Amino acid sequence: MLDRLSREGKQSKHKVISFTCRANICADGSPNAYNSLNTGIDNNANGGISDNMIKKGDFRKRDKKDKIVKDNKGNVETAYGIVVDANTGVAAIQPVKSVDNADKYISPTSMHTKPNSSFVLKDQSSYVNSEEINYIVLPGNFINNLPKDVNLKFGDLVQVFNKNNGKFAFAIYAENGPSGKIGEISVALAKALGIPSSPKNGGTSKLALDITIYTGTGKGQGDGASTSQDEINKRNNDIQAAQTKPTDPCTN
């Protein structure tokens, strides 16, 4: 359920979704999110990884959230928390180990940053880095309840205000999350808003964040601008003057 959702009409050019929420921290997309020693910036369990999977070397069938995706080279993977070969169960490993010599798993985001013609699943740079880019996560039930005329896209521009301390930041929509869990944000966005940024124990339980999404402003999958916070800030500045009343995605 949404903590609060505004119900104030429409914007002429872009439908605007606005809500207030708590904040949990999402590590997905960071090259430091998960590793074989469970010493990444997030707990392996949050990436659907168990010690038994690491021991067996088979990361398939972790839960029903596994989804099959393909890249331009025909690689077939199951991606949830980390990228896993759907046929062998082997986790995709980054070429460089962590400082404590652990194998670093490739952590995807729902949005990829490269065009389909050059998108490679087993490339960490294909995803939106949680430690560098301000992004928000939207749950499945939120997306499914949007009216059909709301053109939500990956890369849609987002403006976030922290009512607790007055801090403001620009962001994008880059990740899908589990239904019923509204209010996940990237490590970078948490830092920008002055919120404890550890995916393990950060965030805030207060209804502190006012989030506004400008739907239809993103370019969808392969939006290269999602790799540059400066470009995200510039694009948000371009539409800031055009802010108008938001629409309610919970009504038809």
Image (cartoon, rainbow, N blue to C red):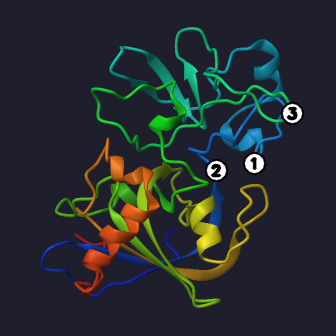
Earlier sequence position, callout 1 versus callout 3: 1
Q: Position of residue 194 (x, y in %)?
A: 66, 77
Q: Are marks 1 and 2 in contact (CB under 8 Å)?
A: yes
Identify the mark at residue 12; answer none if there is no mark. Answer: none
Question: What residue lies at 51% left-to-right and 28% top-to-bottom?
Answer: 123
Please give the residue where the numbered disc 2 appears in the rendered image: 27
Label 3 packing within 10 angstroms: few (<14), some (14-19), many (20+): few
Identify the mark at residue 100; answer none if there is no mark. Answer: 3
Question: What residue lies at 83% left-to-right and 40% top-to-bottom?
Answer: 39
Vertical order, 157 against 27 (above or below): below
Please give the residue where the numbered disc 1 appears in the rendered image: 41
Quadrant for residue 214, please give it.
bottom left
Q: Work out whether residue 216 can be spotted.
A: yes
Label 2 packing within 10 angstroms: few (<14), some (14-19), many (20+): many
Question: What residue lies at 58% left-to-right and 22% top-to-bottom?
Answer: 84
Quadrant for residue 202, please give it.
bottom right
Q: Position of residue 65 (x, y in %)?
A: 54, 36
Task: Say which of 171 and 97 sits in front.
Answer: 97
Earlier sequence position, callout 2 versus callout 3: 2
